[in-house]
Image: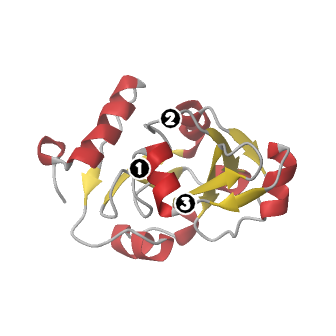
Amino acid sequence: MTDTNSLSKSAQSVQDALSKKGIKFKVVELSSSTRTAQQAADTIGCQVAQIVKSLIFRTKETNKPILVLASGINRVNEKTIEKNVGEKITKADAEFTREQTGFAIGGIPPLGHQNSIDTYIDEDLLSYEILWAAAGTPNAVFDLHSADLQTLTNGKIISIK
């Protein structure tokens, strides 16, 4: 692990966003990749369900970014998200994702984005006390209490299945 005194630029920006929220979570950079939920769980030593997957979608009509924070074991039912959003969505490509969040796919954190993004939180994440989320790079993560996820993101808790 790397201490926060020498975080990469992207990981440091997530640490700064956490600090601005007044919460003392610590971003760590790991020697192994945490790009996928399974890789993250294996590296961290937790259940895949405790991994917060940050998935960016794009609304088809208004071109708005939508962030879905899903449990690592769940697949997102796009129809369910569309009902909540009020229009059809499509998975965002790498360029749109970076434009909206400031981060590359595989390291998107649940907060600290370049633009304001409507966020939806998988209700299944709340059944775990501790969660792990990406922190700006495919190797950076931070842990948090599930009870803090909504406060950090201003997200709406829904069933994503």
Amino acid at dot 1: Asp
Residue 83 is left or right of residue 29, and the answer is: right
Q: Secondary structure at mark 2?
A: loop
Residue 143, numbered circle: 1
- Residue 32 higher or lower than 131, as above or below: below
Counting from the top left corner in percent of width and height, residue 141 is at 36, 55
In the image, which is nearer the foreground, mark 2 or mark 1?
A: 2
Counting from the top left corner in percent of width and height, residue 72 is at 57, 67
The N terminus lies in which quarter of the figure?
A: bottom left
Q: Is residue 132 visible?
A: no
Residue 53, numbered circle: 3
Mark found first going from the N terminus, 2 or 1: 2
Q: Secondary structure at mark 1?
A: strand
Mark found first going from the N terminus, 3 or 2: 3
Q: Residue at x 35, y 51 (%)?
A: 136
Mark found first going from the N terminus, 3 or 1: 3
Q: How many marks?
A: 3
Q: Residue at x 67, y 68 (%)?
A: 74
Specify few, some or many for label 1: CA neighbours under 10 Å numbering under 14, 14-19, or 20 or more: some
Q: Is residue 60 visible?
A: yes
